[in-house]
Amino acid sequence: MTAIEAAIRAAIRTAMTAIETATEAAIRTAIGAIVSAIRTAIGAAIRTNMTAIEAAIKITIGTAIVAAIRTAIGAAIGTTIKAV
């Protein structure tokens, strides 16, 4: 093997190592971006569902309170009318 061949092979090895390193870094970055996007999407979905669940609970509690107040007022009116 001549000096020129050895120099070419060394240059190719160096270039291949640089390409491998750059490719690995790009893959890591892409995977990180994908994981981040998935986390963001899951977080948004959880927040949206929690908001819907909270709203449903508030409506249920509100309805129960209004029903209890109406019943109490109705009973008080009924008692008052009977007393009169």
Image: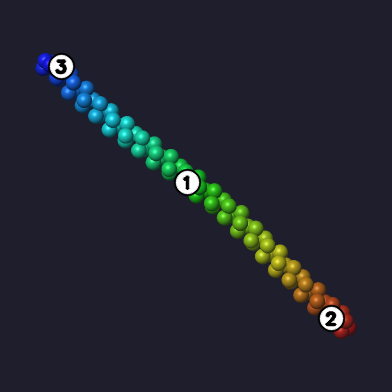
Tag 2 residue? 80
What quarter of the picture does the C terminus occupy?
bottom right
Q: Residue 5 carries which label?
A: 3
Tag 1 residue? 40
User: In the rendered view, does 80 fall on the left or right side of 50?
Assistant: right
Q: What residue type is labelled 2?
A: Thr
Query: Which coloring applies here?
Result: rainbow
- Nearest the eye: 51 or 31: 31
Query: Is tag 1's residue or tag 2's residue first in the polypeptide sequence?
Result: 1
How far across and how far down the image is residue 65, in percent?
A: 70, 68
Count of number-bearing discs: 3
Q: Which amino acid does label 3 sit on?
A: Glu
Mark 1 vs mark 2, foreground winner is 1
How far across and how far down the image is residue 63, in percent?
A: 71, 64
* In the rendered image, the vertical position of residue 81 relative to residue 8, given as above or below: below
Label 2 SS: helix
